[in-house]
Image (cartoon, rainbow, N blue to C red):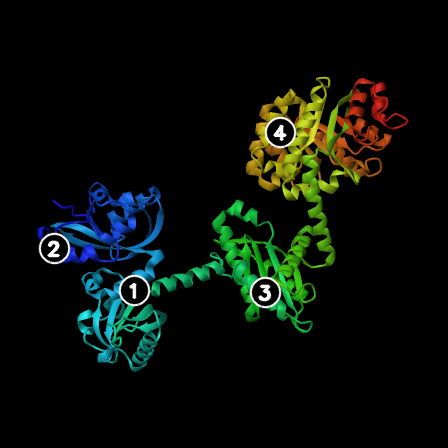
Amino acid sequence: MASPYRDADPAKAPNDDFRSLFKTHPSPMWVYDPVTLHFLIVNDAAIDLYGYAPGDYPGMTVLDIRPQRERQRMLDAVQKRSDVERAERWTHLKASGETFEVLTYGREVRFDGRDAILAIVQDRTEVNAARQQMSEARSLLDSIVDNLPVGVFVKDMAEGGRYVLYNEACGAIVGRPPAEVLGQTDRALFSDRQTALFREQDDRAFAAAGTITLEERMQDMNGVERVLRTAKKALPAPEGRTPRYLLGISQDVTEERSVETRLAYMAMHDALTGLPNRAFFADYLQRAAAAATDEHPVALFYLDVDHFKHINDSKGHAAGDALLRQVAARLLRLAGEDGLVARLGGDEFALSLQLGPDRQAQDFARSLLETLSVPFDLDGAREHVTCSIGIALAPLHASDDDALMRDADLALYAAKESGRSTFCVYQPEMRLEAERRHLLTAELRDALAKNQFELFYQPIMQLADNTLSGFEALIRWRHPQRGLVAPLEFIPIAEETGLIVPIGEWVLREACRAAASWPPHLKIAVNLSVCQFRHTSLLSSVVSALDEKGLQPHRLEIEITESVFLADVEQSLPLLKALKELGVRIAIDDFGTGYSSFSYLRAFAFDKIKLDRSFVAGIETDPGNLAIVRAVVGIGSGFNATTLAEGIETEGQLQKLRDEGFGEVQGYLLGKPQPLSYAEALIYGGGQGWGDAPATAGERMLAV
């Protein structure tokens, strides 16, 4: 018996007419069983397109012509019938292993007494040729035209445009069933305006050498506006005759265009606030800045909600989102119709406004600050926030959007550096400072790679017995051109860029390496930045440095400031406790200069309290400073913490601290920060040769 996949005998098969039409149709098609997924019949065009032998198909399923990544999707489509009565885009697989893109149309049919699915394939690379073949083979198209999800119609132009073919999809688009349309003309179906438009299109199609494609809006019979994309073509006539038939293929793209419109809106607007986004704003600003004049300048305001992260952390992201929406609403009211407000991302907004004689940028900035100073309602709770504002003007500062936005951003940075809750107008020096920071950042990366950092060590003395307690490790940068660079010049940049993390790890390892060779009673103190506490790797870095260098944990002293708690207490406190459980000593540095020192002392048992140098400076003459010194001694005693005073510069200060019962001291009087060789000279050489002449007070104390 002949194979039903290519050489079936029509006389022996049911649905002979269907099989005959199906077998020779130019569009690749097959019928498959939706349960077993096996091919039931495959036409010649599909066999030629896919390259499998006719004898291969009895053992194949529709999954075999799909790459692995498409198979689950196909299974889902068959189960849900999501690929039926609609077009679906797929990637198919030829016998050669080549993949190619197709558009398939599926329809449920009855075949040989069973439920089946008819699949019609369009090879996207030759779709125009396939449409032409379909129009030229009208006798075959009639048998399957209703299976197509696109509208197909044919007009007999010799009879005034009478419809001689009009499929179900066309009826669904227009709102009239084919039975009411066939035999009618456009004039009987549509308005005079629409009829005239169709007539003009038909004339163009007959005049054109090929296919014309149109996209238009029309109302269906229910008055609903639809967007149609229609391809029209005059069908070739036998030689010597004038073409009389017009083929049209229409697709309802109303939903597609609606989706495109929504996507275009989403691409240019912020989902949370509905404001224009950065892309929209940049395009608008480019035109506004180019049109700005000295008489009518354009002001760009960059706004940043101060400490917005605290709102998210304390009240949750829902409250943070509510705050941003309320900020957006206030900015819109203040900007009015003359301004454009955008959300650039996070808690950053931008506002463009044309100025004039009666409107100055600084005045408007003050209005912004005043407007945002009114408490916000976050789920019944009143929340006060402030903002920082950077201002740039066109054409004064720049006349293109990129430069103007960069200048406003620099001004915003300056406003934050000035303490926030204020505004700054761009100045050229800001760009110079930004370039300096950028250059310094690049040099810092280079310094880390080339090992240009080194540690200096400042001695810490015990007042009770005049002995050396240990050293504080202080980083220095030996720049190849500028020489020794103090940390105040580069640590802020390192913290801002995140380089403080690898630099801090180097400091830990180097300090532990040096201290490991000292006598076992000496400790090494290392300062940690708040930025390092934001990284979960800090604990493992400390453990690795101790293990790698062989230093006992109790000999390492970590110094932190209160900013560690202000940044994220929920993360910082467990990390500090883990370090202490490890055996590492924890000291609070710059005590007395923060906001809530006493509350942090209750929250965490520090091993050491370091009194800030500002209170030591006036201890000999200022009763207030002396009272603070005494109070710190009492606090240290109450919390069983060692007290250390830094910044000792006179013998009088040293004696006062000794009299008041301070535990440890450090400062220039006792020894300046010096390279490792000086520290080892102090440890092993009895203190001589620290670098000052005569000997420092620290050397003299050790010599007593």
Q: CA distance from mark 1 to mark 3?
A: 48 Å
Q: Quadrant of residue 108?
A: bottom left
Q: Quadrant of residue 622?
A: top right
Residue 15, numbered circle: 2
Q: CA distance from mark 4 to mark 3?
A: 54 Å
Return the residue at label 3: 285
Return the residue at label 4: 605
Q: In the image, residue 56 lies at what x, y percent?
A: 23, 42
Q: Which quadrant of the figure contains the C terminus?
A: top right
Q: CA distance from mark 1 to mark 4?
A: 85 Å
Neighbour tally class for label 1: few under 14, some 14-19, many 20 plus, Cα within 10 Å: some
On screen, residue 328 above or below 563: below
624 left or right, relative to 231: right
Query: Residue most toward the bottom?
Result: 192
- Secondary structure category for the residue under label 2: loop
Neighbour tally class for label 3: few under 14, some 14-19, many 20 plus, Cα within 10 Å: many
Q: Earlier in the sequence, mark 1 or mark 3?
A: 1
- Residue type marked 1: Gln
Q: Earlier in the sequence, mark 1 or mark 4?
A: 1
Q: In the image, residue 455 lies at what x, y percent?
A: 74, 30
- Residue type marked 3: Leu
Q: Earlier in the sequence, mark 1 or mark 2?
A: 2
Kindly indicate whether the residue at mark 2 contacts the one at mark 3 (C-beta within 8 angstroms): no
Return the residue at label 1: 132
